[in-house]
Image (spheres, helix red, strand yellow):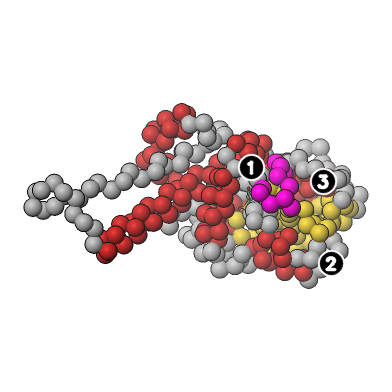
Amino acid sequence: MDPAQESAAGGRKRRRRGGARNRRKASSSSQKAPQPAAAAPPPPPSPPAKRRRKDGTGHAAAATPKRRRNTSSVLDGLRARLSGGHFRMLNETLYTCSGRDAFDYFKENPSFFDVYHTGYQEQMSHWPEQPVNIIINWLKSHNASWSVADFGCGNAAVAKNVENKVFSIDLVSDDPSVIACDMAHTPLETSSVDVAIFCLSLMGTNYPSYLEEANRVLKPSGWLVIAEVRSRLDPNNGGADPQKFSKAIIQLGFSLVSKDAKNKMFVLFYFRKKEKSKAAKSIDWPQLKPCLYKRR
Ligand SMILES: C[S@@+](CC[C@H](N)C(=O)[O-])C[C@H]1O[C@@H](n2cnc3c(N)ncnc32)[C@H](O)[C@@H]1O
């Protein structure tokens, strides 16, 4: 099975276990996730119960250095599990709500963005190859004067690693070079960029509106580069039909130049906007299932 993803069944099992309690918590919290939302982050751990002396005096035994070390590693483990759980909740939220709801949610809780990205980087560290690096190398092998829009830039790795002018876009930013917005509605000028990138960022339930926005800001003949999690485009695994996905983008006004499906974890698409592009009146967009991560 795909090592970075859990099966839908596994996800359902875990949701059932904590379901009622977490749902109650979510509804009373001011940090409520947008609907449909995953469970609220688990509560902080209670302090470990005091150990009693075996002699029955009731005095807590003095911790030996070894015991202290054990306690702190247990606490570190608990902290890591809590933040892992919080990451998975945020990830599921991003995949199951609209970009607008995600934007409002992270605007209200900006610190969750760091929680999400710490967990995301941890998950990605288990992937043998990072799609963002392939895109960076692709850009480096083309034209440094091209302007680029990186939709859902995360930690802005593209901007940090190429000479091109990059407009980095994401929901939240403490980095002034990143445009914080819902990428369905960016402040970029119409027909202003040569390349639009979506590296694992077609997350919202309204993902077609992100591609429509990319179409608006791309110049004629501009490139649309998409990296998506393989299982989301694998019909044998409950994913969408990749042909249907490509066809919808072609109907938007693009030509498919190449597709790279040799990586086990993700698929890359390179589209080019037609010189005279006109989107079809009605496009049959396939639904993309959420990509949920396994507990490690
Ligand atoms: C899986 S991360 C990938 C980050 C980066 N592209 C990379 O490859 O390292 C997806 C990113 O898309 C962003 N994102 C998702 N929906 C968005 C939206 N509607 N508007 C802006 N950013 C969005 C998330 O906040 C997240 O940072």
The residue segment tinted magenta is 173-183
On the image, numbered disc 2 is attached to which residue? Answer: 143
Residue 242 appears in the picture as rendered: no
* Eye-nearest disc, 3 or 2: 3
Q: Amino acid at mark 2?
A: Asn
Q: Which mark is residue 187?
A: none
- Callouts 1 and 3 close, C-beta under 8 Å: no
Disc 3 and disc 2: Cα gap in Å? 20 Å
Q: Quadrant of the C terminus?
A: bottom left
Measured as percent of width and height from the top left, residue 229 is found at 60, 56
Residue pictured at 76% horizontal, 40% vertical: 185
Near mark 3 (Cα within 10 A), the count class, few <14, some 14-19 or many ≥20, is some
- Callouts 1 and 2 close, C-beta under 8 Å: no
On the image, numbered disc 3 is attached to which residue? Answer: 188
Q: Is mark 2 within 8 Å of ligand 1?
A: no
On the image, numbered disc 1 is attached to which residue? Answer: 204
Task: Determine the secondary structure under disc 1.
Answer: loop
Residue pictured at 87% horizontal, 56% vertical: 221
Task: Determine the secondary structure under disc 2.
Answer: loop
Residue 186 figure quarter: top right
Q: Is residue 180 magenta?
A: yes
Q: Residue furthest bottom?
A: 141
Q: Amino acid at mark 1?
A: Gly
Measured as percent of width and height from the top left, residue 64 is found at 23, 62
